[in-house]
Structure formats: C-alpha cells, structure tokens
Image: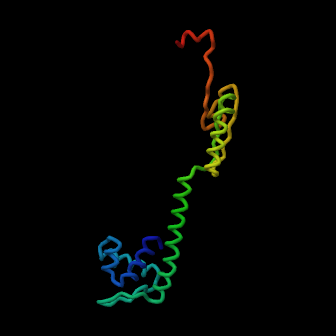
Amino acid sequence: MDRPDLELVLAVRQHGSLVMAARALHVAPSAVTKRLAALEARLGLRLFQRTTRRVSATAEGDTLCERAVHLLRAFDEVEAELRERQAEPAGPIRIAATFGFGRRWLGPALADFQARHPGTQVQLQLTEQLPDLAVEGFDGAIWLWNAPSDRAAEWV
C-alpha cells in the first residue's frame, strides 16, 4: 500500500461517492473504481459498501482510514523536515587561506557564518603555501600574495 492508496480511501470516505472522490483527486471515476477494487483484492477484504446512492466505509475501511490520516500526516512531517534540512547549510567546510588575510578577515567572517548555521563545521587552515586542494580535501582557498619585486614590472 502506498501514499496514493491512502489518499484514495480517505477521499472516498470523505466524499461518500466514487465520482466525487475522483473529482477531488482529479482522476477519472473509472480510475477510482479500478484502484479501489485492486486495493480491496490485494488486501482480501472489502473497505467500502457500495449502493447506487452512497458509498460507506466498512469497519475495516474505517480502521484503514484512521491509520491513513496518521500515516499521511507523518509523510508530510518527514517531507517538511527534509525540505527544512535542505534549506539549511550543514556539514564540514575546509578552507585554506594566507595567514594575514585569514586571521584578520576570513576567520571572523567564518565564525559568524558558523554561528548562523550551527549545522556546519568550518575548518580554516592558515598557511604560507597554497595546498593541493583536491589531494588535501579542501573545499576552497582564498589566496592573496604580492608579486615578486623583480617581476613587478611585467605585471604593469
């Protein structure tokens, strides 16, 4: 049984009609009839009593509908939690930087970032030599340096 099955039985019980349930679910009435019949066959029991004027839940149908309400609510809560987690940055971040810039500017900025996003673990490595980012597992680097004085004329 999956989420569409649970939504189907709830729509049938709520509307008391296969045609009205089909409208609520935006499907053809024949699709509701076939899906409900397939679900009942798979479970080996009747979920709804059908007359020409009304559809009403059996005891088993009521039990399934009560559970369906809780299960669908749980599905919605899990989806909302996962969306919320996706929107919030999380995980380790490794950055390399030069001593002066890293200590003066980047360190405080990263501390503020981590305070705003407690799911992150920021590691700042200050060094004089640019590391091999891929080999050493860095996510990025900010590197500032002065051109050597003998080559300064080439940059102008």
Of 135 and 21, nearer the camera is: 21
Give the residue at x 54% y 58%.
84
Indicate the quadrant where residue 127 lies: top right
Residue 137 percent across, percent down from the top left: 65, 37
Query: How many numbered circles does the render carry?
Result: 0
Colouring used for the render: rainbow
Residue 19 percent across, percent down from the top left: 30, 79
Indicate the quadrant where residue 153 lies: top right
Looking at the image, residue 66 lies above or below residue 96: below
Looking at the image, residue 98 lies above or below residue 111: above
Of 31 and 100, nearer the camera is: 100
Residue 90 percent across, percent down from the top left: 60, 50
Q: Would you say 134 lies left or right of 49 here?
A: right
Residue 97 percent across, percent down from the top left: 65, 31
Looking at the image, residue 110 lies above or below residue 35: above
Q: Would you say 44 lies left or right of 144 here?
A: left
Indicate the quadrant where residue 148 lies: top right
